[in-house]
Every structure is written in structure tokens, then in C-alpha cells.
Amino acid sequence: MTRLLCGMTQKRRHPRRVLPVWSGAPEDLFDYAQPTAPRAGGSRAWPDKPIKVTDDWPEVVPITEAELRVMEGHFAEELDAMFGPRA
């Protein structure tokens, strides 16, 4: 006599997964790769006139206290070599 209690059911049996069989020789493994599409436009030519560079940074660049601590920590050896060790 089999008795099932409330909430206790039998586990479902899942069928075993069948793995795919490779078809053909090992060179078939690379059939998924597609050749790259050619790019339009060809090679770029140098501009006829020089490129204009605009410097619109302020004379004094604002920096936060946290940014200053990060830079001092990162460049500590270089700063000590240039300005001497900290007092």
C-alpha cells in the first residue's frame, strides 16, 4: 500500500539528453565562421589643410580633494623624486 502525504510527490524522471554527433572531419568545426565584410571607402587620405586644435581649457583646472589624493597616491614616488620627500 502506497500512501502519498500532502506536498510529497514523486520526482519526475527527465529523459537523458542526447549529445549531437559531429558530422565529418575536424575541419567542419570551423564552418560557422563567416568571412568579414569588406569595408566601404578604402584607405583614408591625409587632409589637405592642417587640423585646427582649439584649447578651451581654463587657465586653472579645478580639481576635487578626492582627485588630488588619488593622484598623489599614484604618483607618490615620482613626486618625491621631483620635489623631495614629504615633511
Image: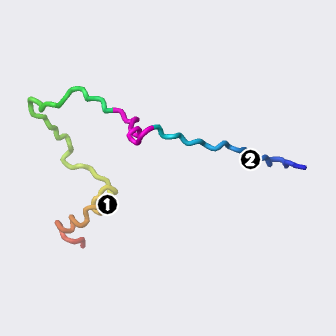
Q: Secondary structure at mark 1?
A: helix
Query: Quick one: which residue is furthest to the left in this view?
Result: 49
Q: Three-letter amino acid code at disc 1?
A: Arg
The answer to whether residue 10 is above or below residue 75 is above
Residue 83 on image: x %, y %: 18, 67
What's the mark number on residue 69?
Answer: 1
* Position in image of residue 75 (x %, y %): 25, 62
- Residue for point 31% across, 53% down: 64
Extreme residue in the front direction: 24
Q: Which residues are magenta?
A: 24-34
Q: Residue 74 vs residue 2: left or right? A: left
Identify the image quadrant of residue 29.
Answer: top left
Q: Residue at x 16, y 38 (%)?
A: 54
At numbered mark 2, what does the secondary structure look like: helix, strand or loop?
A: loop
Mark closest to the chain's N terminus, 1 or 2: 2
Please indicate whether residue 31 sits to the left or right of residue 72 in the image: right
Question: Which label is found at residue 56?
Answer: none
Q: Nearer the viewer, residue 67 or 81?
A: 81
Residue 21 included in the magenta stretch of the image? no
Expressed as whole percent of the image width and height from the top left, the position of residue 47 reads 12, 31
Q: CA distance from mark 1 to mark 2?
A: 60 Å
Q: Which amino acid is tagged 2?
A: Lys
Q: Quadrant of residue 66?
A: bottom left
User: Circle 2 is placed at which residue position?
Assistant: 11
- Judged from this view, the residue extending furthest toward the bottom is 87
